[in-house]
Amino acid sequence: MDRAILLLSVLSVGVSSQPITEGQRLFSIAVERVHNLHLLAQRLFSEFESSLQTEEQRQLNKIFLQDFCNSDYIISPIDKHETQRSSVLKLLSISYRLIESWEFPSRSLSVGPAARNQISPKLSELKTGILVLIGANQDGAEMFPDSSTLQLAPYGNYYQSLGADESLRRTYELLACFKKDMHKVETYLTVAKCRLSPEANCTL
């Protein structure tokens, strides 16, 4: 009886343990990297928000909800249902654009030099990894079919000398947008990675 149970256990492990493909390995690395960036963005935003007075937090949050992030010009799924219907290549392409859109603005984040010095190389590494994944999933398709119509403007007056109030608003918006976009990229890459496992449930 014990021998039969042991045999069934070995067989079940053999059936369920599929070898990890190179694509899955690369996706796992990309998801881990963006997850770390998202956690860093959350921490930086929380630290900045906690340094504000309650009324300042309320006013800045109210203003932010009425404004747009620069990356909102990048066409992306409007909800979780559209995200799940999007192809792997589309999710990768949008993720690439979102990461690329932060390469320059990230240098202007009002955070400590140690944190700021972490962000740029992490974005660069993630961008390179996503580009490799795009190449592996292209199958002859054009990488960015509508890239000619995409022209992201700089982040408004974020690089000008501003008064104290405007500087506070700029910092709040940059950190909030950075957190929002890293969350988007983490969601898109997680769904794309899940698609490589046919038996997996990719429900958000």
Image (cartoon, rainbow, N blue to C red):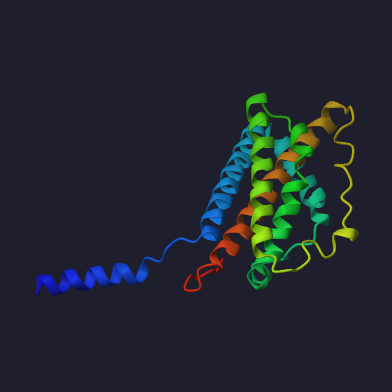
Q: Quadrant of residue 173?
A: top right
- Quarter of the picture holding the C terminus: bottom right
> Visible in this render: residue 51?
no
Residue drawn at 82 percent across, 49 percent down:
70
Name the residue furthest front. 140
Q: Which quadrant does the N terminus fall into?
A: bottom left
> Which image quadrant is residue 202 in?
bottom right
Could you tell me residue 156's position as x and y percent? 89, 41
Q: Nearer the viewer, residue 158 or 9?
A: 9
Residue at image position (65%, 64%) is 137
**Residue 61: image location, x then y, percent:** 73, 44
Residue 60 placement (x, y as % from top left) = 76, 41
* Whether residue 144 is visible: yes
- Residue 62 place in picture, x, y as percent: 76, 47
- The total of numbered circles placed on residues is 0
- In the image, 121 versus 115, the foreground residue is 121
| Quadrant in the rendering for residue 6 | bottom left
> Which residue is at the front of the view, 9 or 76?
9
- With 18 as the anchor, is 9 left or right in this view? left
Q: Spot the residue most to the top.
A: 113
Name the foreground residue: 51 vs 27: 27
Q: Residue furthest left?
A: 1
**In this view, 73 is above or below 81:** above
- Does residue 106 lie above or below 98 as drawn? above
Give the residue drawn at x 55%, y 60%.
23
Left or right: 56 in relation to 159: left
